[in-house]
Amino acid sequence: MSEANARRVLGLIPARGGSKGIPKKNLYPIMGKPLLQYTFDAAQKSRFINQVMMSTEDVEIRAFAERYGVDTRYLRPHELATDEATTIDVVLHALDWLEERGELPDVLVLLQPTSPLRTEHDIDQAVGVFLREGCESLVGVHPMIEHPFKCMQVDADGSWQFLAKPEKYVSRRQDYRNNYFAINGALYIVTPAWLRQQGNFVVEGKTHLFEMTSVAGVDVDDLTDIFQVEAYLKMAAKS
């Protein structure tokens, strides 16, 4: 039995019903498919993930996931479906539920449905690294779109300073050092023991950074993001 098959790798998809930016965002149609379905497709095609489970309080989302073959036995409590509830609390509650049933995974892959351009190939590459390197925590990142050499912090009194400064003057973006990254939210991979001990997916200096393209890391928050995703999908369909 391969290491991948020997591990219980859970793909957990958190999707609450409420959304301020786009009503019912997780079921919003993009190119004829609900937003959630893109993550379902990627998780179910992954060669590493052997269980895909929902975390939702929403009846409509739960029914859609069940029709799609996703494990919907776990129902998120309503107190963990508010704006104030943290993702950590949501995931820890789901892990406790699984442990009570003797189903605690060896590896947890958190797949937020707001990353529809993250594919099964992204997932498998990340999980592959996680297993080979013996990681306990891994997070998806991509090079910062706005480089820190061009970004500034503005204080309350109106004074400001650049977030980062080059050792010497740099005028062309192609000469910038490409060593600044942003967490994209598309992939978080941890062991349950790490999450319970650290109380966080990402710990500075300890979490492995998995570089992804900025396209794979697109996060859908408003209609502008949806238009961007649709544009990428249309271009991909023509290529």
Image: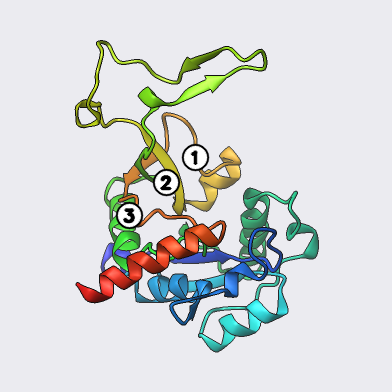
Circles 1 and 2, Cβ within 8 Å, touching? The answer is yes
Q: Which mark is first along the chain, 1 or 3?
A: 3
In this figure, which residue is indicated by the disc labeled 2?
139
The answer to whether one can see residue 111 in this image is: no
Label 2: how many Cα within 10 Å (few below 14, some 14–19, many 20+): many
1 on left or right of 224? left
Vertical position of residue 126 compared to residue 65: above or below: above
Name which residue type carries label 3: Ala
Sequence-wise, the earlier of marks 2 and 3 is: 3
Q: CA distance from mark 2 to mark 3?
A: 9 Å
| Quadrant of the snapshot with the C terminus | bottom left
Q: Nearer the viewer, residue 125 or 239?
A: 239
- Disc 1: CA contacts within 10 A as few (<14), some (14-19) or many (>=20): many
Q: Which residue is mark 3?
A: 126
Residue at the spot x=45%, y=70% of the render?
39
Residue, disc 1: 202
